[in-house]
Image: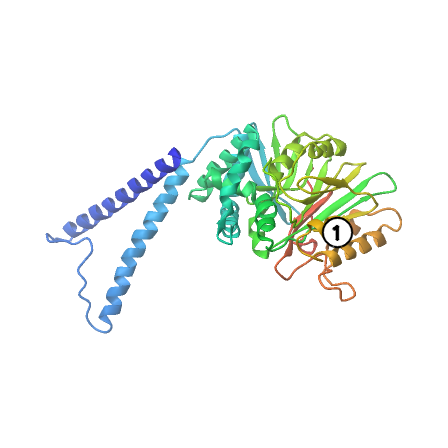
Amino acid sequence: MIPYLLSLILGIALTVGFWLLIIFLYRFIRKRKGHEKPYHLFPRFSFRGKLPRLKKGLAITGYIFLLLSSTLFLYNMANKITFYRIVDGYAEWRESNGQQYLYVEADDYYSLGYLKGEYMASKIAYINLASYLMLQYNGENYRTYANNYLSYIPDEYIEQMQGMADGATHGFGFPITFEDILVENCFLDLLYGQVYPLSAGGTVMGCTAIGANNSDGTITMGQNFDLNPLAEHGLTYVHYKITGKAEVFCLHLGALKLPIAKNSNNVSTVANVIGSKLVGEFTVPSCIFTQYCLETATNATHAYNLFASLAKRPAAYNLMVCDENELIAVQNLPHDYRLRSGNPIVQSNRFVYSDWNEDYFLWGDYSTNRQYRAELEANNSFIDNYLTNQELLTILGLKEEYNNLEDSEICRTSGRSNTLAFITRESFGIGTVHDGVGELPI
C-alpha cells in the first residue's frame, strides 16, 4: 500500500510543480512584453462577435482539459517512477511465422512476475477490467471470494504475483494491485467454480481438445481456445525460464496462466472448463497449480500424479496431459475424477459420462454437436492409426457446420464464443489456424 501512496504523493507534487512552472512562465512572458499588474493566470473572458458564449465555453473546456490531462499524465509518470525496479532477468518480444510471443528469463519469481507484468501491462489492465465486470454477477461481488484461495498458494507464487502487480503498474502507469493480479489468477475458478454454479447461469466457453496415441508410439495433441471475442486483446503466449525449473511455454489471459502449455521436458497440457452445478472448492487455483506442475513434471505420469494428488479442485474441467510416448485424459469434478480411455480422445466443454451430464452439467445439450463432430473428424483422420500435426491443425480449422448440425463448428468465428487461440505439441497461434501458425520454441 505504501508504494501506491508514495506514487500518489509524487503525482500531486509533480502536478503542483507543473502548474507553478506555468504561472512563473506566464508572469515572465508578461513582464518581457512590458505588462505589469494586474495579471491573470486565467485571463478574463471578454469575447465579442459571433457566438461569444460558445467561445467562452470552449475556452473554459480547454483549460479544464489541460488541467485534467496534465494531472493524469503526471500521475502516470509518478507511478512509472515509483514502481521502477531493477530485477534479475530480462524479457523481449519474439516472433515465429508472424505469431508474437514474450520471452522471459529470471533468477527468481519476483523478477519473473515483474518482467511479465511490465511487458504485458496493457493486457493485464484490460483483463482486470473484464474480470471486474464479469464477476459483478446478480448483485454479488465475486472478486472478494479470491481471498479464500490465498492461503493455499505457495510463497514463491505470492512473490510472483506481487512482482507482476509492480511490473504492470510500472508498465501501464496506473495502479494494478496485488488483489487485481490475485483475482485474474483465480478468474476461471471464480467464474466456473463459484459464479455459474451459484447462479445457475452465465456465458460459456467452447474449447475443443484432441489427442491421439499414434501407431509408432508418438503422441499428437492440441486444442482451440474459445472465449468472448473481446478477450483476444488480453491473450499472450509466454516462453519463460526460471533458474532451477523446466522451461514453460503457455498461454496467458492477462495475468492468468492457462493450462494450455508445454514444458522443456516435452510434457504438454490442454484443458476445457465445464459448467457444473457443483460449487468448486477453495484450494490452489488451477493456473497456479498448472504452473507448478509444468515447472516440475518430468513426464506425463509425473504430471498426472501431481494433478491427481489434489484432494479437491476449484472447478470442473477436462484435462489431457502427454509426453512423447504417453497420453492421459481425465475429467474432473470438484470432489471426483475419472480417467478417459480410447484412441483418439476428444474432449470439449461437457462430460462424456451420461450420469455426470445428467446430475452435474449446467447447460443441457451444450457442446454435444461439437463433441460429435470433433470425434468424427479425429476418427476419420486416424484411420491409418496416425494423426499428424497438420491433420490436427486442419481439424482445428474447420469453420463450417457439419450436415446442418447447429454449433458443430470446431473453429468458431462468429457468436459470443469464438476461437481466439490454438496450440499443438508443435504449433501455436493467437487467432485461428487460418491467421498464421507459429512453431513452438520448446
Q: Is residue 59 visible?
A: yes
Q: Position of residue 42 (x, y in %)?
A: 20, 55
The residue furthest left is 37
Please name the amino acid that badge 1 sits on: Leu
In this view, the residue in front, 322 or 240, is: 322
Report the number of numbered marks: 1
- Label 1 Cα crowd, 10 Å radius (few <14 / some 14-19 / many 20+): many
Is 241 on the left or on the right of 353, as rendered? Answer: left
| Vertical arrangement, residue 36 with respect to residue 309, above or below | below
Is 104 on the left or on the right of 305, as rendered? Answer: left
Q: Residue at x 61, y 59 (%)?
A: 416
The residue furthest bottom is 50
Q: Residue at x 17, y 49 (%)?
A: 27
Q: Position of residue 43 (x, y in %)?
A: 18, 58
Q: Quadrant of the C terminus?
A: top right
Q: Position of residue 5 (x, y in %)?
A: 35, 37
In this view, the residue in front, 317 or 426, is: 317
Q: Is residue 255 visible?
A: no
Picture quadrant of residue 265: top right
The residue furthest top is 244
Q: Position of residue 232 (x, y in %)?
A: 58, 52
Q: Secondary structure at mark 1?
A: helix
Scheme of image coloration: rainbow
Residue labelled with disc 1: 393
Q: Quadrant of the N terminus?
A: top left
